Amino acid sequence: MASLKELCGGLPLSPLPANRGRDPSVPHAPVRTPNLTPEEKRLALQNALRYFPPALHGTLAPEFAQELREYGHIYMYRFCPTLRMRAYPINQYPCETRHAAAIMHMIMNNLDPDVAQFPQELVTYGGNGQVFSNWAQFWLVFHYLSTMSEEQTLVMYSGHPLGLFPSLPSSPRCVITNGMVIPNYSSRENYERMFALGITMYGQMTAGSYCYIGPQGIVHGTMLTVLNAGRRYLGTSDLRGCVFVTSGLGGMSGAQAKAAVIAGCVGVIAEVDEVPLQKRYEQGWLMEVTKDLDNCIQRIREARRAKMALSLGYHGNVVDLCLRRQVAAINKLSEEGMFFWDYGNAFLLEAKRAGAEVEKSGGGATEFKYPSYVQHIMGDIFSLGFGPFRWVCTSGNPADLVQTDDIATAVLEEISATVNERVRQQYSDNIHWIREAAKHNMVVGSQARILYSDQRGRVSIALAINKAVADGRVTSPVVISRDHHDVSGTDSPFRETSNIYDGSAFCADMAVQNIIGDAFRGATWVALHNGGGVGWGEVMNGGFGLVLDGSEEAGKRARMMLNWDVSNGVSNYHALQNTGQPRSGPSTAEIQLNY
């Protein structure tokens, strides 16, 4: 495939592209085992063939059936484009509207081999975070985006493009749902079966919503978690000589190495798979790698004595055999003075299900003997309205990112002088982050930046960036977004809402209302997902993208939508009255507070 124009031409059917099979030069997703019945296998094949005229079924059916047998899913490798997947500058996309071009920019970033975990299986991160279910859907979506107008909306059903439908210019250009199943059928077994059938998919958080920005997307939050863990458990913000032990160097967990260094401590990260370990090392996200445990321990001791910041990757398992053994080791180390917390992968929940000793005597349904990082650290930050705001410079020009970094720094410094001490601490941490970000070369893929900010900060930064696009200081539109893991974006009783103790942690009103509200307040696209982080059926979450094109209309949308996107969650936490900040939302807002 030679050009973006050809990529937007719809499914290549005459002639069919050559069947090149899987590319051995890139990592591939694990083989799935959906255990389909013979009838379900026929149904999966039938569902895959719906994208193709009957004349091609004789050629494609045996091929798709073989993929289903060998890999547990029909990815349609034949249709994987030959054009290099990356976030091309927005002006290179042949579209009727720049809003659609911005969405295409974001999709291609999610599938960039430097960014995506399993690019040929359309998995961005998390092992199963799909952008689409198969490559036919990719081609169809790009065709729709390239032809749509400002009075149409693309509707996405779990990777499947339902089509373009008439809408208002103020409506979203794309509305995405991933994994929306009847609650009684939201089990892991049903997911495996339905994904194999091609009728639903797991979008993780920012994979299926087209908003992933590489491992940088979680670095800032991880740095804040480590920094505030030091304050809570060790009584200090100076983490030199302290050791942070964790595991995982994948698309999200890979952020832990960089975060440890920025926080100033010794980060030791175990990873069982050598491919992501080497990938993070080659990308500069990991300073050292070792396979020898004795050498690993020696380097920890040396770094502690020198009080040097170090990220050390250990190729091996953080624990062998089973969760019960791991918990026994954690219990022993905790007795010796180590502080442990669950960092968002439902470890404690799965350990409990495995029969490990993690239950808290007299604790509630979401409480264990060890806290989640939300219960002890991030929940307090969320309750103040601070969360993982982000932006992407669609020009692809690093100079635009530098300009937006400078704009954000100036905005934060101005606001910081007007808030109380508790909030000022958050602003201070985030100003430190934005000043240091460029030094640590965190861009992988699109020219993007993550920055924890509150409602007032997000609105002010968005308006300032929009003005910079208007006057040419920033050369192309900027997409603003956030992680779903945010103040209002996620209902997850064992992670984001684990610090809600009135019984509503298992309710999903906040996340669903958030996306509905974002959609009619100006978002360019919205997404609502079942699953993300802690697993299918355990969480409801959503996100958005909003294009700042320098217009007055974009500024109005940003102000209206961002005010809602943050205040919804803060109100749900019943903490708005404690922020110490003037309300930056519309004067007509009336919020019910508890006595």
Image (spheres, rainbow, N blue to C red):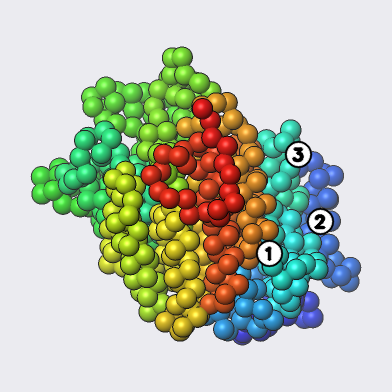
Q: Position of residue 65 (x, y in %)?
A: 76, 56
Residue at 55 percent across and 26 percent down: it is 502
Number of the front mark, 2 or 3: 3
Residue at 89 percent across and 68 percent down: it is 54
Number of the front mark, 1 or 2: 1
Q: To which residue does mark 1 refer?
A: 172
Type of residue at label 1? Pro
Q: Secondary structure at mark 3?
A: loop
Would residue 249 be seen by someone viewing this image from the given angle? no
Return the mark for residue 31. none
C-beta proximity under 8 Å, tags 2 and 3: no
Q: Position of residue 111 (x, y in %)?
A: 56, 66
Mark 2 or mark 3: name the one nearer the start of the chain.
2
Return the mark for residue 182. 3
Q: Nearer the viewer, residue 548 or 552?
A: 552
Type of residue at label 3? Ile
Answer few, some or many: residues within 10 Å of disc 2's Cα (few below 14, many 20 plus, some between 14 and 19). some
